[in-house]
Amino acid sequence: MADSTAKRGVLFDVDGTLVDSNYLHAVAWWQAFRQQDHDVPMSAVHRAIGMGGDKLVEHLLGEDRNEDMDEQLDDAHGAIFSTWWPSLRSFDGARDLLLACADKDLTVVLASSASETELKVLRTVIDADSAISAATSSSDATESKPSPEILQAALDSSGLTAQDTVFVGDSVWDVKAAAALEIPTIGLLCGGTSEAELRDAGAEEVWENPRELLESLNSSMLGKLIAGA
């Protein structure tokens, strides 16, 4: 139960949660793998989106891969994905959801593993900087999701505690990372992961997208956090 006198906040994943980028990431990884003659099915790539690049490569190629090529794969993915930056769009309601949370006195933090340069692009796409109190990037953690390091960094950067925070994400890796810190998670379907998968991973609520969560804000876990329940 949240302490009504404590600082309360919400951590938001970005890719696939606030910005419609997951499938572009999947294509970028697929092309990066093809450059090194790895024929990884795109469906498998998509299911791994939400992991950091290091974890994703190991997950898809296995421990017997040539690890010396991991950095080259990650760089190739980043270069390919950057060509789509001008096309990126936030999900309907993403900006309004962040503004509404801030207006309700929730500390809003972006818990992203994107590079600092990419994070700047994503923040421009979301266009809600006035609502955002803090944001993390890949430089804030040595291990990526499903490790909880980036979420811990988000808590530390904003002065929040896990018991007075809710996490909003779109992948099973988001949910698992939050669970490691005992942060309750709201899952969104807009990243392409099913409700069943999100709930099996431990998501306590699932909504279609930021707009639906915003329209149900008062009855959601965020509404309960706002009320200090």
Image: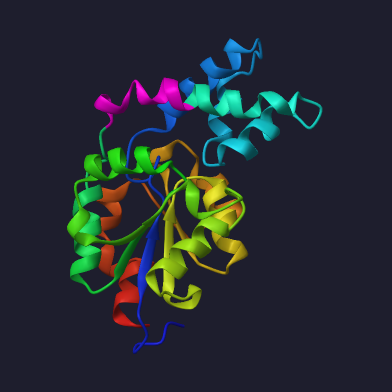
In the picture, measured across the screen, residue 161 lies left or right of residue 91, that is: right
The answer to whether residue 32 is above or below residue 47 is above
Whether the magenta-drawn stretch holds residue 86 is answered as yes
Q: Residue at x 25, y 26 (%)?
A: 86
The answer to whether residue 53 is above or below residue 28 is below
Of 68 and 127, nearer the camera is 68
Which colour style is shown? rainbow
* Residue 204 seen in the current view: no
Q: Residue at x 55, y 20 (%)?
A: 42
- Residue furthest out toward the right: 64
Which quadrant would the C terminus be assigned to in this image? bottom left
Q: Residue at x 59, y 12 (%)?
A: 34
The answer to whether residue 198 is above or below residue 79 is below
Counting from the top left corner in percent of width and height, residue 91 is at 27, 40
What residue span does the magenta drawing correspond to? 78-88
Q: How many marks?
A: 0
Of 177 and 187, nearer the camera is 177
In the picture, measured across the screen, residue 102 lies left or right of residue 40, that is: left
Q: Main secondary structure of the magenta part?
A: helix
- Residue furthest out toward the bottom: 5
Q: Residue at x 35, y 61 (%)?
A: 109
Counting from the top left corner in percent of width and height, residue 168 is at 41, 56
Whether the magenta-drawn stretch holds residue 92 is answered as no
Of 99 and 109, nearer the camera is 109
The answer to whether residue 206 is above or below residue 35 is below
Counting from the top left corner in percent of width and height, residue 204 is at 49, 62
Counting from the top left corner in percent of width and height, residue 194 is at 50, 41
* Residue 214 seen in the current view: yes
